[in-house]
Image (cartoon, rainbow, N blue to C red):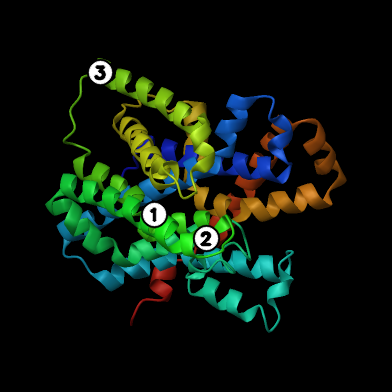
Amino acid sequence: MRRNKGIDIARAIAIMSVLIYHFYVLVDGNRYIDYPIVHGLILVGGEIGVTLFFIISGYGIFLSIKRMEEKDYFDYWKFMKKRCVRILPQYYLSLLVIIFIGSQGFVLSKDGVWHIITHALLIHNFFPSTCGSISTVLWTMGVIFQFYLIAYWLYKAVKGKPVITLLLSIIFTVACKILIFHFVFKQMHIENSYYFIYGRQLFTAIDNFMIGMFLACYEDKIKVKKVFKYLIIIVTVIITCVWCIMPQASYRHSDSLSGYIWSSVLAVLLGIMVWFLGTYEYKKDTKVLKSIMFISKYQYGIYLWHFVVAANLIQNSPAFNKLAQNSFLGLTFILCVICVIVGYISTITLEAPDYAKVFSRK
């Protein structure tokens, strides 16, 4: 199947947003608070990246199911096996490396068994004690895998009534946040981290995936003149930047109006950008575009390994620690190159074997 270059660009933007955000956190980026616009955009880089990942996941899964239906018929178990073969080898390897070689050896204890079990079953994102306990980036894998489990029924809903389904998903997402943040958490004495954890579960981020499915369903149906298309994307980019740096953005995970709607509005804005990128005509494969395609192709491996690699280098290497103090831009460039190489090696090593045949029934 021919890849959509625009979606690959969006995927590359997502992974780079997450990388820059995590590198920023690791070097205590608050010291750059004197540059409020840049500081504000980087601080929401993780939100932007994850939201794009969820939107793109919805987009890709819709088309995958659609192709299965058009080719023959949809086989749920075949669909899930393909998803597992795609994500689990690298996921489980990253867990093993982090546990046995990294800094999370604490889970190799009686108290740590629960952390290992929940991560192995991809339900670790449900529990505050295990969400991010082994690796701060792996919580998203639980959410995405849970989306796969119900994706077919969401696909049927979008295919049948796309606009109504999309609107209902946004209403449902906001309603869940109001219920949890205002009525449940208000009765409990909890840490602020709970708002983030339960504000990015499948049921409080379902609109992200549905926006992607909606775009895939309507990719050939939205016709806009080129001049208006450019106008729309310019306005959208401006609104997105304002939305990310406005004071209310700091309350995006809280019992407030911003806490209820901020992520949903961001998802809609990013969805418009994904639509623009996905429908734009790319006439030449420039060196820059080829580099972006490369990053996009190996983004999953890059995502799984980047944090543990960066944290290890910054914390344990005097050279990287010094660079972190002197030049965040230089550090980011070098770490990005290293993480891309690690993601590439991990991907070609674990995805090269034909696991589909290995695990197929005889």
Give the residue drawn at x 63%, y 65%: 133
Query: Looking at the image, which residue sits at the far front?
Result: 187
Task: Name the element at disc 2.
Answer: helix
Query: Looking at the image, which residue sits at the far left?
Result: 160
Closer-to-camera residue (36/258): 258
Identify the residue position indicated by label 1 in the image: 177
The amino acid type found where label 3 is placed reads: Phe
Q: Which percent across, then down, holds residue 233?
A: 35, 24
Position of residue 219 relative to residue 298, above or below, is above
Identify the residue position indicated by label 2 in the image: 139
Horizontal side of 7 relative to 24 (left or right) equals: left
Q: Which percent across, then down, holds residue 318?
A: 87, 45
Task: Name the element at disc 3.
Answer: helix
Nearest to N terminus: mark 2 or mark 3: 2
The amino acid type found where label 2 is placed reads: Trp
Are the residues at dot 2 and dot 1 in contact (C-beta closer than 8 Å)?
no
Q: Nearer the viewer, mark 2 or mark 1?
A: 1
Position of residue 25 relative to residue 193, above or below, is above
Give the residue drawn at x 29%, y 65%: 150
Give the residue drawn at x 70%, y 49%: 310
Give the residue drawn at x 51%, y 48%: 299
Disc 2 and disc 1: Cα gap in Å?
18 Å
Q: Quadrant of the C terminus?
A: bottom left
Query: Looking at the image, which residue sits at the far top?
Result: 227
The amino acid type found where label 1 is placed reads: Lys
